[in-house]
Image (cartoon, coloured by chain):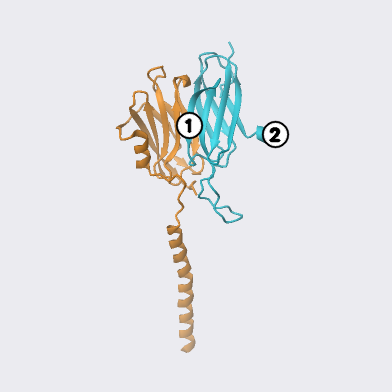
Amino acid sequence: MAAEKRRSMIKMKPKKYKVGDTISVDFIIIHPMDTGMQKDKKTGKIKPAKYLDNVTFLLDGKPFTTMKVWETVSTNPYFSVNLKVPGEGEITVEYTDNTGEKGSKSAKLKPKG
Amino acid sequence: MQRRSFLKGLCAATAAAAAGPVLLSAKEEANAAPQGPNALSYAMAVEAITSGKNITESTKVELIVPEIAENGAVVPVKVNVDHPMEENDYVKAIHVLGKENGNSRCADVMLTPMNGKGYFATRVKLAKTQEVVALVELSDGSFISASKSVKVTIGGCG
């Protein structure tokens, strides 16, 4: 469970922000992003493709950025987009990969001042 | 005399034996050039995104990539679009493409006015030295783009 918790994270920059500010929301996730072209060094067999294909950024359940991603994105990907802070809320990032694996991560949006 | 000719023959034979497998393996590699699951050329990818519309090069799109990437597996890419983000006039999508990659598409990002700014950053893999293209779609359906070449010393794909 601890490992599951650490698989992904959401970072907001800068740390202190007000309503109406434009902040950057970074999403970082541990994921192999295998292209389906590399060989496994131990077994010598070609590793099957495993990459994220859909990433959605939601604010209180309403999507504000949707991404279609391909295997050409680096291992342990990082995606950064901007968000104009409308007030308090919750940012959720949902992702699926080509093997059907799903997951999501949430973070609270707390503007000050 | 006999010994000399025998040695000569032996040398030629070993040379041929050494050269043979090398040639063969090179051929095999060329034949079995790995094809990714979504291999798509740059021209096809652009066609799929724009469906034949004109693309204009614009200074409004700021593409930040390193000039030389030591490791092609991790190349940071940043796209900044100098365009208002209002209800009726905003940046609709940012596409990041690598021209020479097996699958030239890297990420298609659909933005909304809630973003506040046309900005996207990620890290991509580049197979070899090539141009990275940021293709930006505005809400009125027009396309603007910027491209920059990145020197890759070690390839990142495959």
Q: Is residue A92 above or below residue B132?
A: above
Q: Residue at x 55, y 14 (%)?
A: A87
Disc 2 crowd, CA 10 A, few/some/many (<14, 14-19, 20+): few
Q: Which residue is mark 2?
A: A2
The answer to which image quadrant residue B23 occupies is bottom left
Q: Where is residue B4 drawn, in percent x and y?
A: 47, 85
> Residue type at mark 1?
Met
Q: Residue at x 34, y 23 (%)?
A: B140
Residue B27, disc: none
Chain A drawn colour: cyan
Front in this rendered view, residue B137 or B65:
B137
Secondary element at tag 2: helix
Q: Where is residue B114 drawn, in percent x and y?
A: 47, 19
Residue with the most extreme right position: A2
Mark 2 belongs to chain: A
Chain B drawn colour: orange
Q: Residue at x 48, y 47 (%)?
A: B157
Q: Are marks 2 and 1 on the same chain?
A: yes
Front in this rendered view, residue B76 or A9:
A9
